[in-house]
Amino acid sequence: MIKLKIKTGDIVRVITGDHKGAEGKVLRVDREKNKAIVEGVNMVSKHTKPSAKSPQGGIVKKEASIQISNISLIDPKTKEATRTGVRVEGDKKVRFSKKSNQVL
C-alpha cells in the first residue's frame, strides 16, 4: 500500500480524464483501492426501487470514486494544482505546498 498525499476534506482538481478541470472537496478516501470520492465530480445515475427510506424511488445522482493519480491538491494561496511535501515543525509533521511553501 502506498502513502497517499490526499486526505478527507482537501480541495482537489481533476487533472486527467472525462472530468478534467473539475474541482471539489474530498469526501472519502479508500486507501486499499487508491480511490477517492470528490464532491460534485464523476456523478453517476443510480436507479432505485421505492422503499421505506425513499418512497418515491426513481433515479438518484451520486458521486462515484476516482483514481488518486487523476487528482491533484489545490494550493490555497495560488489556487493552482500543486505537489505536497512533509516536514517537521517542532514535534509535528506538517504537509506543505511545494509551489508556495505554505502549510496545508
Image: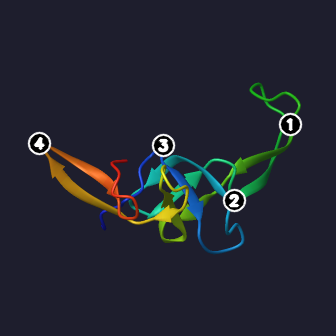
Residue picked out by circle 2: 42
| CA gap, disc 1 and disc 3 | 30 Å
Q: Residue 30, image x and y in percent?
A: 45, 55
Residue picked out by circle 4: 90
| CA gap, disc 2 and disc 3 | 17 Å
Quick one: label 1, few (<14), some, or many (20+) residues within 10 Å?
Answer: few
Q: Judging from the image, what secondary structure is the residue with disc 2 in? A: loop
Q: Nearer the viewer, mark 3 or mark 4?
A: 4
Q: Which mark is residue 9?
A: 3
- Vertical side of 44 occupied by 62: above or below: above
| CA gap, disc 2 and disc 4 | 40 Å
Q: Quadrant of residue 97 in the image?
A: bottom left
Q: Which mark is residue 57?
A: 1
User: In the orientation shown, which residue stands out farthest toward the left?
Assistant: 91
Q: Residue 60, image x and y in percent?
A: 80, 44
- Look at label 3 and name its amino acid: Gly
Q: Judging from the image, what secondary structure is the residue with disc 4 in? A: loop
**Residue at 57% across, 53% down:** 37
* Mark nearer the N terminus (1 vs 3): 3
* Mark nearer the N terminus (3 vs 4): 3
